[in-house]
């Protein structure tokens, strides 16, 4: 899955900007990144969507795990890409008053709506109640809000970076982003969420703990690794 957002939606994280500046490397534009995704994943199976002027979303079922499928849904100007499976989907359906046929991506849209409409409902409560292997991207066109998260154990790889033309991109394919983002690239930290409504990256188990970016070694694919202060180890999803 792939989500690409202009600076009108997401300010490029300073840590990723700095990582790219320390070790300059080739990058491509957001448009080239999307084109490469479609070409690499298969023209017949890849689905892409432009949401307004500032957002591009894409996904495919090509080479997906049967246990961790990718899915997409849109409702009431809320768009969601979801990869993985929730162990507690049944109880969450009851919590949000959903039909038994509702899958994970529908659940995330409803969970986000609850977060948005029941303010000040904390974002960490929404993701903290999810159990399983997952990564998701939610974009609310009506408020131009982005909400991204990864499970606590990093079972579903998720990466983010900055393209040559300043777009922030999220994807489950590190090699794809490497070609577009160079060293302005990092593994999205497990057990964390990014929300433009709260102003950045947070750990949902300890949302008050500061998250810092540790510069990576030159031989690593990343430009930085994000670490939650107070956590026993560096939180970084790996393939």
Image (tube, rainbow, N blue to C red):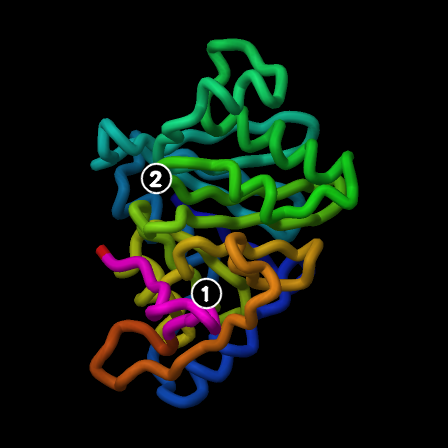
Query: Where is the C terminus found, in terms of image quarters?
Result: bottom left
Residue at mark 1: 29
Disc 1, disc 2: CB below 8 Å? no
Report which quarter residue 184 is drawn in.
bottom left
Expressed as whole percent of the image width and height from the top left, the position of residue 108 reads 54, 32
Tell me which label, 1 or 2, sits earlier in the chain.
1
> Is any part of residue 35 visible from this angle?
no
- Our reading of the magenta stretch's main secondary structure is loop
| Rendered view: 9 above or below 221 | above
Q: From the viewer's side, name the closer residue of 66 and 86.
A: 86
Q: Residue furthest top?
A: 100
Q: Residue furthest bottom?
A: 22
Q: Is residue 237 magenta?
A: yes
| Rendered view: 116 above or below 187 | above
Question: Distance between the Cα atoms at labels 1 and 2?
Answer: 31 Å
Q: From the viewer's side, name the closer residue of 177 and 91.
A: 91
Over which residues does the magenta segment extend? 225-238
Judge from the rendering whether residue 146 lies leftward or rightward of residue 26; answer left or right: right
| Rendered view: 130 above or below 154 | above
Judge from the rendering whether residue 111 lies leftward or rightward of residue 193; answer left or right: right
Query: Where is the N terminus found, in terms of image quarters?
Result: top left
Expressed as whole percent of the image width and height from the top left, the position of residue 90 reads 45, 18
Residue at mark 2: 133
Residue beneath the point at 51% across and 54% down? 205
Q: Secondary structure at mark 1?
A: loop
Residue beneath the point at 44% across and 41% down? 58
Report which quarter residue 161 is drawn in.
bottom left
Q: Nearer the viewer, mark 1 or mark 2?
A: 2
Expressed as whole percent of the image width and height from the top left, the position of residue 183 reads 36, 77
Instruction: Categorize mark 1 by other alpha carbons within 10 Å: few (<14), some (14-19), many (20+).
Output: some
| Rendered view: 149 above or below 189 | above
């Amino acid at each position: 899955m792939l989500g690409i957002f202009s600076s009108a939606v997401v300010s490029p994280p300073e840590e990723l900007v700095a990582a790219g500046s320390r070790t300059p490397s080739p990058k491509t534009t957001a448009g080239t990144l999307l084109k490469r995704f479609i070409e690499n994943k298969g023209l017949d199976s890849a689905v892409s969507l432009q949401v307004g002027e500032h957002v591009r979303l894409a996904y495919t079922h090509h080479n997906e795990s049967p246990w961790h499928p990718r899915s997409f849904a849109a409702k009431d100007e809320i768009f969601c890409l979801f990869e993985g499976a929730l162990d507690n989907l049944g109880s969450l359906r009851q919590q949000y008053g959903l039909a038994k046929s509702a899958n994970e991506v529908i659940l995330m849209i409803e969970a986000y709506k609850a977060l948005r409409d029941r303010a000040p409902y904390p974002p960490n409560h929404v993701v903290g109640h999810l159990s399983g292997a997952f990564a998701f991207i939610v974009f609310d066109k009506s408020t131009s809000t982005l909400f991204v998260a990864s499970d606590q154990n990093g079972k579903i790889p998720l990466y983010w970076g900055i393209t040559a033309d300043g777009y922030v991109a999220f994807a489950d394919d590190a090699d794809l982003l490497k070609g577009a983002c160079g060293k302005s690239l990092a593994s999205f930290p497990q057990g964390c969420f990014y929300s433009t409504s709260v102003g950045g990256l947070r750990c949902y188990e300890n949302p008050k703990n500061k998250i810092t970016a540790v510069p990576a070694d030159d031989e690593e694919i990343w430009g930085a690794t994000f670490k939650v202060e107070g956590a026993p180890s560096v939180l970084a999803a790996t393939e």
